[in-house]
Amino acid sequence: MVPEESHEGRVIWTLIATRAIYALNWLNIGTIFAEMGLEFKQGPVGLGLLTASFYAGVGLMQVPGGIIAARWGYKKVSVVGVLVASGAALLCGLAPGFDVVVFLRFIVGAGMALFFGPALVLLTRSLRRETSGLGSGMFSAAFSVGGIFAFFVWGLLAATAGWRFSLVASGALGLASGVALQLMVPPDVPRAGFSVELKGLRRVIVNRKLVILGLGILALSIGNGLLQSFMFYYVSQKLGLGVAESGLVASLIVAVPILSSPLIGSRVYDRLRKPKLIMIMSDVVMAAALVAAAAGSVAAAVVGGAIGGLISGLGFTAGFAAAKDLNEGEREYDSLAVAWVNSISLIGSFGPPIVFSLIAAAMGYSPAWIAGAVLVLLFTAPLLFLEEGLKPRVA
């Protein structure tokens, strides 16, 4: 299903704004956790549990979301996903206990899974000159804009107005974006004669290239997720920076991709069309970023965050653009292809935050960052078996 071809600019900006607020509700938990942890008596392991719960939800619902989108339409599923995720994010601010927050973060992740793939396809198809790299780059840049607010503005908001108010506020913004999505994006128009079939689903799920690509994105996601989830807490609690300074350092992982995603990532991918080369390079550089953070100084944290942000913009843009282009089935399954590789990366991201937090609590942060780098390189290895090149799809 595709949207009616009208008011492209309105659709594009609505999707970008929704994606930015989506990122705010994804990332702000790490910036407000210091205050939340004091109330619930939780430390790094508690943050690891919240992160793992979220990744479980967003990972497990990727493929079901892609299948539902192929059957019901991209807009409908996107709107439902935003409303579910935002409602759960708001309720986190009202939670009576830490266990409730852990459960609600799972729901936040599940809702976001329903939004991601369908919305990315909607955005790409709304561009006047449909290019996978440009659409993916714009989507990644929008996430980074939301990340800046999460790391900087929401950290200050939590410190002044309280962590509960900050979560309620971001959840309310998400609900408003869901309403805007419903009002501003035209309805889905089904293609005559198309129906979701097991053969079409199987064509995506058993696609060897998509599976290997998903593992390569997993490698990048491990490094990116650790930097996003733990950097603010690390520099504020371990290195002793204030809230504003910690927000600036932590925001590098999402600020740099605002430029690197659309200006570098999309252009490199659309010109080279070599996802294997781009992903291997991105993963290796991400591992280097984690090693840099392990040096244990503010300067090292800045270098690690900046490098991680730069390469995330390139790697994620290329990875998700390639997922759509490597889909050898019908166009209606583009969202499922994106969701499938994203599911592999996100489900695999469930464990690393727990491992990282346990190592950090027992041995310190430097060994934890090094362990993260090792995991990144481990999941980079399958990319060596990815065939370069894109095959024509089914009409």
Image (spheres, rainbow, N blue to C red):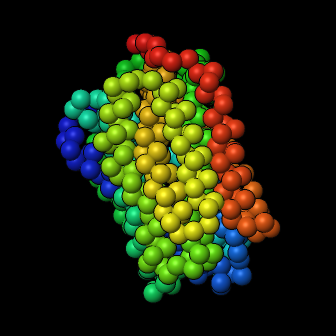
Residue 90 image point, x, y percent = 51, 70
- Residue 369, quarter of the rendered image: bottom right
The answer to whether one can see residue 75 in this image is no
- Nearer-the-camera pick, 243 or 238: 238
Residue at point 72%, 82% (across, down): 41
Q: Is residue 345 left or right of residue 248?
A: right
Residue at point 45%, 24% (across, down): 274
Residue 134 image point, x, y percent = 32, 36
Image quadrant where one finds the C terminus: top left
- Nearer-the-camera pick, 260 or 102: 260
How many discs mark residues in the rendered view? 0
Q: Residue furthest right?
A: 362
Residue at point 75%, 56% (across, down): 355
Q: In the image, is residue 130 above or below residue 149? A: above
The answer to whether one can see residue 196 in this image is yes
- Residue 202, quarter of the rendered image: top right
Q: Is residue 265 left or right of residue 67?
A: left
Residue 106 image point, x, y percent = 63, 58
Q: Residue furthest bottom?
A: 160
Image quadrant where one finds the N terminus: top left
- Nearer-the-camera pick, 4 or 24: 24
Q: In the image, is residue 21 above or below residue 129? A: below
Q: Is residue 378 left or right of residue 232?
A: right
Residue 109 image point, x, y percent = 57, 54
Residue at point 41%, 18% (across, down): 193
